Amino acid sequence: MRGNLFVISAPSGTGKTSIIKRLMAQLPSLSFSVSHTTRKPRPGEKNGIDYHFISPALFKEWIDHGAFLEWATVYGNLYGTSFEEVEKKMDQGLDVILDIDTQGALQIKAKKDIAPEERGQFSPPVFVFIVPPSWDELHKRLSLRGTDPPETIVLRMAGAKNEVKSMAQYDYVIENRDLDEAVYMLKAIIAAARSRRRCSLSGKPLPFLDEVGFKG
Amino acid sequence: MRGNLFVISAPSGTGKTSIIKRLMAQLPSLSFSVSHTTRKPRPGEKNGIDYHFISPALFKEWIDHGAFLEWATVYGNLYGTSFEEVEKKMDQGLDVILDIDTQGALQIKAKKDIAPEERGQFSPPVFVFIVPPSWDELHKRLSLRGTDPPETIVLRMAGAKNEVKSMAQYDYVIENRDLDEAVYMLKAIIAAARSRRRCSLSGKPLPFLDEVGFKG
């Protein structure tokens, strides 16, 4: 069975990485998407594993051809997620996790609104937003992490409040009060997506009906 | 936390009742909705437990006031599910299961399209359709049950093929190949619904933000 795409965003410090890591250890059917970038590989980085390293010219050509689900410029380098990369894994039956910020997610959200039949086999992505229990708790977690100076924490808090404004565009909101509970909720969302009706409401035949022998 | 409403339909013989029974034994937060009816109680039936028994006059008054999520006439008696009955349980934090046919489900579906804020706290119901692996398998199960004469089985098969036409209106489709697997899928759907974003996309403030202390 074909996998699904999960677009997961969270303000930094919310615990998103811990939740995803824990879940990937539990679900062998989960996979990360490898991004394309125009930046040069750093020592130790492997092409096709850490990133797909491509030239700016090729990246721009791909943008023109609509090959990216989402892309962005960061410090002068281009980064993007290609349809091909994601669809390849979904075709293998893998559920693909895209761990991206709200700007990238909103680019994908715009594409989600295209009718499924126009996108061939591309099932609508599932959008998941993870929030901390409160602003105070987020501030505490960022401080306890000890990786950022106070002025960076101020910036991260402002960024978090800005990102949360996009929450209404997401399908699910998980509150990370407790790591185990948050992992369970994300697992349920991923499992439930496997049962989503795979068709449009336009009256076109349901592939599912064929698959299960419902020939009428 | 407020519960959700799950509208579950399946052609007879699909195993819906077994799936729901098994799941209700596992999840204490699951509850059945008690219907209202104008038919007279049968021996042993208790008011408020098996049905809410009310007069035809009162039932019709309630219809006029839009008090029913769905209602139908069966052999001259009226049967219906009241908003109040369902909302009361959801307010208690219970997830409510409505085990109804596709006609009743489509009545509720029509109400689902009302914007959430116009319905107050009424979160959109989740629609789940359960199918057998194939028509042959359904026929086999109906025959093995041994409760119906061949001519009734012919009618049930025709009814099933008719009901499946409404499948495109449902959010989820579970194929009941294996009882444990089907129970797991329904459980995931029920758990995932707890993380649904509880707001409209109209830009109105998210109650969730208040709940978790996100006062900005």
Image (cartoon, coloured by chain):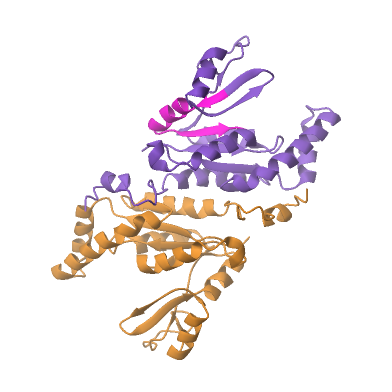
Chain colours: A orange, B purple
Magenta residue span: B80-101
Left or right, residue A122 beside residue A213:
left
Of residues A26 and B124, the one nearer the viewer is B124
* Residue occupying image coordinates x 57% and y 35%: B107
Q: Is residue A72 visible?
A: yes
* Residue occupying image coordinates x 22% and y 66%: A156
Compared with A172, B166 (above or below) is above
Furthest residue toward right: B150
Q: Is residue B46 visible?
A: no
The total of numbered circles placed on residues is 0
Compared with B53, A32 (above or below) is below
Compared with B114, A22 (above or below) is below
* Residue occupying image coordinates x 65% and y 43%: B166
Picture quadrant where residue B50 is located: top right
Picture quadrant where residue B23 is located: top right
Is residue B87 rendered magenta in the image? yes
Furthest residue toward left: A150
**Can you give x and y, in whole percent of width and height, for residue A137 in the image?**
22, 54
Of residues A121 and B135, the one nearer the viewer is A121
Is residue B138 rendered magenta in the image? no
Furthest residue toward top: B43
**Can you give x and y, in whole percent of width and height, for residue A180 in the image?**
38, 51
Quarter holding the N terminus of chain B is: top left
**Can you give x and y, in whole percent of width and height, for residue B205 in the image?**
30, 48
**Can you give x and y, in whole percent of width and height, for residue A97 in the image?**
46, 65
Left or right, residue B41 beside residue B29:
right
